[in-house]
Image (tube, helix red, strand yellow):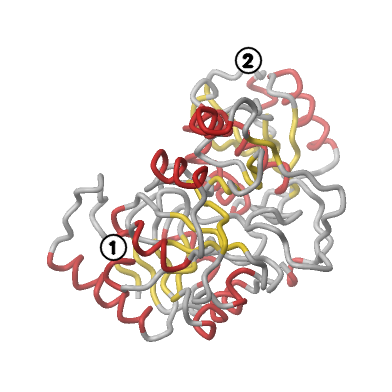
Amino acid sequence: METPFARPDGALWQPSAADAARLDQAASILRGGGTVAMPTETVYGLAANALDADAVAKIFLAKQRPHWDPLIVHVSDFAMAQTVVAAISPAAQVLIDAFWPGPLTLLLPRSARIPDIVTAARPLVGVRMPMHPVALALIRRAGVPLAAPSANRFGHISPTSAAHVLDDLDDRIDAVLDAGPTTFGVESTVLDPSQHPAILYRPGAISREEIASALEPLCGLDPVREWKTDTLTDQPREALPSPGVGLRHYAPRARVILVPAHATAIAAALSDLTLLGQRVGLLLPRHLPGAIPPAVLTQAICFPWGNWLLPETLAESLYAGLRSLDSASCSAIVVPTPEPSGIGAALLDRLQKAAVPSQATDTDR
């Protein structure tokens, strides 16, 4: 079932009678233990009842996701969040007040209602309240919190449209709610606020700088640190500490090649790859420093990648660009490297993980 909506804008969105019927049908599927791909403001998520271990298992099966990778639970309001966590620290409350609903996932002590399969048997559960009106309406109608990782095959490019979901998961899930393209285009920020400093596991649309500004009055200076590890592999020996920290993620079949954000470096990479017989794609933003010679650009399939001076436009179209160039049978995709600040840190995180060489065959991914 794919159900198209008129593009809903704003928290006060009211569904039409037809849209309400589609939401009710999807909610019924979820209450019955099925799976529904739903839009959020970040990417499309594959949702199931987070309180039903058998339903959550269907997410792992559809995505071919390993059970050592925990999921994020989506709630529609603070009261629902209180049913899935055992405690909310003062720092967590500050962040909830500042950024919910929105693209911030908090790792909090799980309640007894959350089955082990959701958290990979770890004591913390990732929780967020999405700001997308269709997602909120669906959770309210279902009446249960929804576990919902990105609605794609494990390790592949995350979906920012219903068409992307169907490319990966058609015939593997029960329904897709189509509300048009997502807004932010990259997954939520993931943070453990119970530590001091708080641990930033995955950068996202809510930046480290914004989180630090919110926490400083309570926690003092430098209240956030980034999680780092030198030991992560494609097949970790134990459950990951957080969603979204897998070694290779967000990856097209093509090899992703990161280059300095200047026309000279991009032109050199395109020429070198073309000489090697590669079919080359390029994520090409407007207002990039320097000018790439037109003759060099003809060597590549170019995707117009937003405005370099407005990194939020790069985030919005990142996954669509990677998918488009992958569909064009590119064997290599050249990408200029964003600055690691604001949402640029999230872009850099996703691109670095997409550029990790695969240790699996295409049939394994």
Side of 149 where 123 appears, left or right? right
Q: Which residue is mark 1?
A: 4
Q: Mark 2 packing: few (<14 Cα in 10 Å), some, or many (20+)?
A: few
Which residue is found at the position 81% from the left and 66% from the top? 235
The correct choice, above or below, for 180 with respect to 110 in the image is above
Q: Quadrant of residue 126?
A: bottom right
| Residue sitting at the far left | 17
Which residue is found at the position 68% from the left and 54% from the top? 249
Q: Tell me the element at label 2.
A: loop
Side of 248 where 20 appears, left or right? left
Q: Percent x, y for residue 304?
A: 52, 33
Q: Nearer the viewer, residue 57 or 123?
A: 123
Q: Amino acid at mark 2?
A: Pro
Q: Residue 289, which numbered label?
A: 2
Q: Percent x, y for residue 236?
A: 81, 64
Q: Nearer the viewer, residue 117 or 222?
A: 222
Q: Quadrant of residue 212?
A: top right
Q: Percent x, y for residue 330?
A: 68, 48
Q: Quadrant of the N terminus?
A: bottom left
Which residue is found at the position 43% from the left and 67% from the top? 37
Q: Tell me the element at label 1.
A: strand
Side of 69 where 217 appears, left or right? left
